[in-house]
Amino acid sequence: MKKSHSTTLHNIQILRALAALLVVMHHLLPHYQVMGGDFYIIRVISEWGFIGVDIFFVISGFIMSYTTFEKDRTYANAKIFFKHRLLRVYIGYWPFFVAMLILLYVTTPTQITQLDMVGSFFLMNVDMFQLVLPISWSLSYELYFYFLFLFTFIFSVNQLKILIPSFIFIIFTSVIYTFYNPQTPEPFFYSHFVLEFFSGVILYMYRKYLFNSGILIIALIIIFIAMWFGITYETKNGLYRILTFGLTSFSIILVALILESKHIYYHGKYLEALGNASYTLYLSHLIIIQLFYFSGLRGLFTSTYTILPLLGFLLVIVLCVIFSLIYYQKIEKPMYQKAIHL
């Protein structure tokens, strides 16, 4: 019987941690600016920190392939995969859904009436302005990815090497059509985010051809060019996002994997621990930022002096990290472990 991989991908864990921190910085930026913060490097990194979501999508596609493609293509394994993925998403998400709902009820109760409660609870809505926890829009795409990936168990890996590139071509063609026909409703089932997920699958399937020094140099050049183009022309949505920040994310992960294949990685227990807790960090940080604001702490760090807003900015990040590490180890991880063994 085929076995799944069990070794830790150190560089991927570190990328998970960094991607989550980028998203935190992105959402914290408006508060930093209101406090009077003006460090250029913080503003630039934070402004484009949403790329953390793109990185997560590509990693998700790679890891699902990494953990399942060496297993037997059976109904039993497909069922286990889907069960574990659903439990991972919802067990992690629902406590923070409740926490944010309570916070909204205490601070801005009128806002609750404008939200899609059912869609928020079951992750069936991608409009962040209608969600209890706005960041959860990405989880709806993640669940859709899992559903699509479930069908890969029907085919052999060799068959998938033909079918998945064909599927990517169909989705890419649909994205192009939508781009040139703006009257077309914004897609969900053939969103450009689907391409990011399946690019991670491609990374795994063709790793033997991609993991070499020549590709490493090309990937680094692509990162520079794609990132420059994305920032210069502010390509934050649609087709241009996948061609800039999507391609950047793909290349960053490719570089990390090539380095790891050559045994070049940073084995740091703290960054890897944060990588494990990255989902918690991703879900909890908006609540902590809101508490920072409504508690009045933000006002204490508001100043015309540069150092005070910076301290406030760093304080929130540290609080988010500490909470995530503790919550993941003490609550989320044990809950998930118990659930998958029921």
Image (tube, helix red, strand yellow):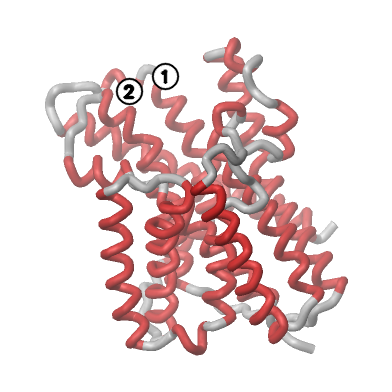
Residue 327 position in % (x across, y down): 56, 45
**Which amino acid type is marked by label 1?**
Ser
Q: Camera-side residue: 15 or 151?
A: 151
Element assignment for label 1: loop
Q: Camera-side residue: 32 or 271?
A: 32
**Which amino acid type is marked by label 2?**
Arg
Could you tell me which residue is drawn at 51 percent across and 45 percent down? 282
Q: Is residue 263 above or below residue 230?
A: below
Q: Quadrant of residue 133?
A: top right
Q: Camera-side residue: 221 or 88?
A: 221
Residue at mark 2: 298
Residue 192 in view of the camera = no
Residue 336 position in % (x across, y down): 71, 54
Q: Is residue 139 left or right of residue 339?
A: left
Element assignment for label 2: helix
Q: How many numbered marks are there?
A: 2
Residue 23 position in % (x across, y down): 42, 45
Give me the disc on residue 295: 1
**In the displayed image of the protein, which residue is found farthest to the left?**
305
Residue 320 in view of the camera = yes
Could you tell me which residue is drawn at 38 percent across and 74 percent down? 255
Q: Is residue 99 left or right of residue 107?
A: right
